[in-house]
C-alpha cells in the first residue's frame, strides 16, 4: 500500500486513483496533472475525460474504464511490471466512492497505490452556478439519492441540501421533502453538466418543480440544490452569464495562427473549434528566398516589411538553415502589418520599428510608411517576404513613396483539405453559433471546402474587405471589428453576444444561442 510519504514518490510500479474533478478540465489538481504526465497507462471514460489526455505522453496506453475488471486485472498487471497507472475518477475518488473494490484489488495484489483528491461537484457545481454552499446557516448536507429511502430525515434544517444522482426523480424528491415538512416555497436549483460549457441551471421552488422541469431536458450528471442560498444566484452567477456562454464558434485558421484567439474566446465562455482553410507550404523554388536572405545580411535593404506571422516564420526558418539569428537584423528597419505579426517578430528577438496604429492592413501600413529621403536613407530598397497570392497594392504604394521593392515569395498558400463530415454538416446545418472570418481568403476557402454557413450562424468579419467577401457569397455580416485584429474581432463578437443576452432578459425570455433558433433545435423551457 501507499507509504504515506509526503513526497508521494513511488519506488516501482503503482496505481494512482486521481480525482478528475466535476467536468471543467481546468479544475484538475496539479498533483493529478503531474501523475498523468508520468503515466505509462491511463484508465478513464474517454468520452468524458478525453481532454485530460493532453497532459500525457504520446505513447501512453489508454484503457477503457467501462471494460469489466480493467483495473483489478490489466491495471494491476501493468503496475506489477513496474509501470505507472493512473485511474481517472469522477469528482473526488473518496466522495461517494465507486472505486472501493478497485483499491481493494490493488491492496490484495500488494501493488503500491495512491489516492489523489479531486474537486467534488458538491462544491464546484454550486460555485459555477453562483450558489454559495453555506450562507448565514452553518449547515451543508450532501446526499446520494440512490441511497435514500426516507426523505423525512432531510426535510428539516435551514441549511443547504445538495442531492447527487436525483435528476430522474427530482419531482418525486421535491414532493417528499414538502410532505415531510419542508416549506413548498423553498428555492431549488437543478443544474446539469456542471462546470462545463453545457451547464444548464433551472431555478424554481419545491412547489413548482413539476411544471418548471417538464421541458427542461435535464440529464445526469446533475445536482439538485435545495435551500435559501439558491436565491443568491441572481447576484452571484458568473459562469452561465458569460457573453458567449456555450457558443460553438468556428475559427477557420490553423492552430498556430489561432492559439491566442482560441484562449480569448474561451474566456468569454465559448467553445471554439479550429478548421484550417489554408495550408502553408514552402515556395516551389527556394532560390529567390536564398538570394533575399543573402541580401539582407550583406546590407542590400533599408527596410524589411512583414505582412503576416507566416512570413516571419518563413524567414526565421531560413535563418536557422543558414545558422543565423535575430542579430542579422542589426542596422535594418523592420515593419509589421499588425499586432500578431509584431508578436511573431518579438518572439524571434526582433522589435519592429513600424506597426500601424490605425488599420492593421497593407493600406494602414502605407499610411504611416515614410517616403524615401536620399538625405536620410542610404539605401532605397525594401524586402517584402510574402505569400505567393499577395496583392500588388503594397508594392505600388511603396513605389509611389520612392522605394524599390523586392517582392519575394516566402511561402505558398494552398487550400486545405475539407474538414470531417460532421464539421461540414454543422457548418451548413446551423450547428455553429458563430464563425470568425479574419481575411477574405478565409471566407472563400471555407465556403470552398465546407460550404456556406447556415443563416442562423452569426458572421463576424475582421474588416470591410472581409465583410465584402462574405456578402458576395450571400452571407449576412452581423459583427465587424472596430480595428483589424483577431483580438478586436473576438471582443466585438463577445459584445454582440452580451447585447443579445441582455435583450432576451429584458423581454422576459431565456437567452438562447443562435444555433438554438434553427428549425428542429431542441428548445428548453424557462
Image: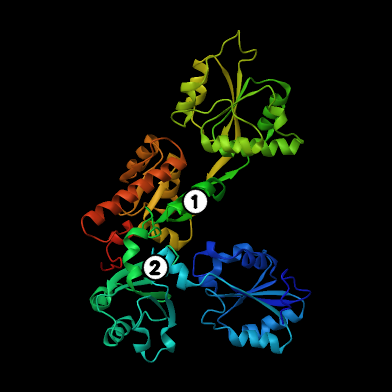
The first of marks 2 and 1 along the sequence is 2
Q: Quadrant of residue 331?
A: top right
Q: Quadrant of residue 195?
A: bottom left
| Left or right: 505 as drawn, with respect to 197 | left
Quarter of the rendering occupied by the C terminus? bottom left
| Left or right: 511 as drawn, with respect to 7 | left
| Left or right: 158 as drawn, with respect to 342 | left
The residue lying at 64 percent from left, 66 percent from top is 31
Q: Residues within 10 Å of mark 1 (few under 14, many from 20)?
A: many
Q: Position of residue 289 (x, y in %)?
A: 66, 32
Asked whether residue 291 is in view, the answer is no
Q: Residue furthest bottom?
A: 149
Element type where label 2 sits in the image:
loop
Q: Which residue is mark 1?
A: 262
Q: Residue furthest right?
A: 11
The residue lying at 73 percent from left, 68 percent from top is 7
Q: Is residue 474 above or below residue 300?
A: below
Q: Is residue 36 above or below residue 152?
A: above
Q: Is residue 470 above or below residue 386?
A: below
Q: Quadrant of residue 111?
A: bottom right
The residue lying at 54 percent from left, 14 percent from top is 402
Quarter of the rendering occupied by the N terminus? bottom right
| Left or right: 500 as drawn, with respect to 332 | left
Q: Position of residue 388 (x, y in %)?
A: 55, 35
Q: Relative to the observer, which residue lies in front, 421 or 248?
A: 248
Q: CA distance from mark 2 to mark 1?
A: 36 Å
Q: Residues within 10 Å of mark 2 (few under 14, many from 20)?
A: some
Q: Which residue is mark 2?
A: 135
Q: How many numbered badges does the structure rendering display?
A: 2
Q: Position of residue 296 (x, y in %)?
A: 69, 25
Q: Relative to the observer, which residue lies in front, 240 or 156?
A: 156
Element type where label 1 sits in the image:
helix
Amino acid at each position: 500500500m501507499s507509504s504515506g510519504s509526503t513526497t508521494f514518490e513511488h519506488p516501482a510500479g503503482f496505481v494512482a486513483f486521481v480525482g478528475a474533478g466535476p467536468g471543467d478540465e481546468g479544475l484538475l489538481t496539479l498533483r493529478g496533472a503531474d501523475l498523468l504526465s508520468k503515466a505509462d497507462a491511463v484508465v478513464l471514460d474517454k468520452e468524458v475525460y478525453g481532454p485530460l489526455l493532453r497532459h500525457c505522453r504520446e505513447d501512453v496506453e489508454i484503457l477503457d474504464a467501462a471494460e469489466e475488471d480493467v483495473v483489478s486485472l490489466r491495471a494491476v498487471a501493468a503496475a506489477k511490471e513496474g509501470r505507472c497507472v493512473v485511474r481517472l475518477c469522477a469528482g473526488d475518488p473518496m466522495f461517494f466512492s465507486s472505486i472501493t473494490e478497485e483499491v481493494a484489488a490493488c491492496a490484495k495484489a500488494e501493488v503500491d497505490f495512491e489516492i489523489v483528491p479531486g474537486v467534488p461537484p458538491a462544491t464546484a457545481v454550486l460555485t459555477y452556478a453562483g450558489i454559495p454552499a453555506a450562507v448565514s446557516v452553518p449547515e451543508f448536507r450532501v446526499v446520494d439519492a440512490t441511497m435514500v429511502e426516507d426523505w423525512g430525515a432531510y426535510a428539516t434544517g435551514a441549511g443547504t441540501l445538495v442531492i447527487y444522482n436525483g435528476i430522474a426523480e427530482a419531482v418525486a424528491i421535491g414532493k417528499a421533502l414538502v410532505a415531510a415538512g419542508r416549506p413548498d416555497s423553498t428555492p431549488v436549483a437543478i443544474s446539469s453538466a456542471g462546470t462545463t460549457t453545457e451547464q444548464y441551471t433551472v431555478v424554481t421552488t419545491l412547489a413548482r418543480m413539476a411544471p418548471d422541469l417538464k421541458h427542461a431536458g435535464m440529464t445526469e450528471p446533475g445536482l439538485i440544490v435545495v435551500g435559501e442560498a439558491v436565491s443568491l444566484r441572481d447576484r452571484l452567477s458568473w459562469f452561465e452569464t458569460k457573453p458567449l456562454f456555450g457558443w460553438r464558434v468556428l475559427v477557420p485558421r490553423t492552430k498556430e495562427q489561432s492559439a491566442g484567439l482560441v484562449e480569448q474566446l474561451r474566456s468569454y465562455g465559448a467553445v471554439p473549434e479550429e478548421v484550417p482553410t489554408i495550408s502553408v507550404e514552402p515556395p516551389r523554388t527556394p532560390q529567390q528566398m536564398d538570394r533575399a536572405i543573402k541580401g539582407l545580411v550583406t546590407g542590400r535593404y533599408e527596410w524589411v516589411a512583414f505582412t503576416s506571422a507566416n512570413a516571419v516564420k518563413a524567414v526565421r526558418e531560413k535563418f536557422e538553415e543558414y545558422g543565423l539569428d535575430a542579430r542579422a537584423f542589426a542596422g535594418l528597419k523592420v515593419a509589421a502589418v499588425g499586432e500578431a505579426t509584431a508578436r511573431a517578430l518579438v518572439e524571434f528577438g526582433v522589435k519592429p520599428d513600424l506597426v500601424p496604429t490605425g488599420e492593421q492592413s497593407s493600406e494602414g501600413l502605407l499610411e504611416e510608411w515614410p517616403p524615401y529621403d536620399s538625405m536620410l536613407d542610404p539605401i532605397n530598397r525594401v524586402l517584402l517576404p510574402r505569400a505567393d497570392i499577395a496583392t500588388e497594392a503594397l508594392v505600388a504604394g511603396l513605389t509611389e513613396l520612392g522605394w524599390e521593392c523586392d517582392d519575394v515569395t516566402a511561402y505558398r498558400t494552398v487550400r486545405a483539405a475539407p474538414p470531417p463530415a460532421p464539421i461540414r454538416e454543422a457548418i451548413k446545418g446551423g450547428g455553429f453559433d458563430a464563425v470568425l472570418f479574419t481575411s477574405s481568403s478565409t471566407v472563400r476557402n471555407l465556403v470552398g471546402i465546407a460550404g456556406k454557413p447556415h443563416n442562423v450562424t452569426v458572421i463576424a468579419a475582421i474588416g470591410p474587405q472581409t465583410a465584402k467577401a462574405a456578402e458576395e457569397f450571400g452571407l449576412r455580416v452581423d459583427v465587424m471589428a472596430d480595428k483589424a485584429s483577431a483580438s478586436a474581432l473576438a471582443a466585438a463578437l463577445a459584445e454582440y453576444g452580451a447585447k443579445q443576452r441582455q435583450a432576451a432578459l429584458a423581454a422576459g425570455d431565456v437567452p438562447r444561442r443562435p444555433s438554438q433558433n434553427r428549425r428542429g433545435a431542441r428548445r428548453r423551457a424557462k
